[in-house]
């Protein structure tokens, strides 16, 4: 086995070891597009365009993954989304 192959295998093992979770935002009939967009920008570090696209996906599909990462990073973000009146959960 060449050195290059050994390095590639080591990287793949490290990537698999990191558990990735997602914050899923669900549609509701209460919040305005503006509120959802502003909240995604401030809580999830989205750009305005990204937040707008997510809000449209949520509106038309009923849900959208708005942030991916480790649970310890997502938990406070999800809490802030819930405190803002949005319907979200970590999966």
Image (cartoon, grey):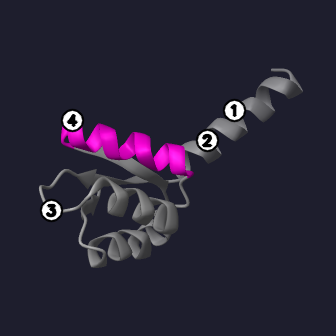
Q: How far apart in space, not on screen, are marks 2 and 4 (Cα)? A: 34 Å
- Quadrant of residue 53 within the rendered picture: top left
Q: Are marks 4 and 3 in contact (CB under 8 Å)?
A: no
Nearest to the observer: residue 71 or residue 81: 81
Q: How far apart in space, not on screen, are marks 1 and 4 (Cα)? A: 38 Å
Horizontal and vertical percent position of residue 24: 30, 52
Front tag of 1 and 4? 4
Q: In terms of secondary structure, where does tag 1 sit?
A: helix
> Which mark, residue 61?
4
Looking at the rendering, the stretch of residues picked out in magenta corresponds to 47-62
The earlier-in-sequence mark between 1 and 4 is: 1
> Which mark, residue 13?
2
Q: Are marks 1 and 4 in contact (CB under 8 Å)?
A: no
Query: Would you name the residue on which mark 1 appears?
Result: 9
> Which mark, residue 30?
3
Q: In terms of secondary structure, where does tag 2 sit?
A: helix
Horizontal and vertical percent position of residue 21: 40, 54
Query: Which residue occupies the extreme right position in the image?
Result: 3
Horizontal and vertical percent position of residue 82: 27, 73
């Amino acid at each position: 086995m060449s050195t290059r192959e050994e390095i590639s295998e080591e990287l793949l093992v490290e990537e698999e070891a990191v558990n990735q979770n997602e914050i899923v935002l669900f549609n509701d009939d209460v919040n305005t597009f503006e509120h959802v967009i502003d909240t995604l920008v401030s809580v999830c570090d989205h750009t305005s365009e990204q937040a707008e696209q997510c809000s449209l996906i949520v509106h038309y599909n009923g849900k959208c993954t708005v942030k991916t990462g480790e649970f310890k990073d997502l938990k406070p973000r999800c809490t802030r989304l819930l405190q803002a009146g949005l319907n979200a959960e970590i999966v």
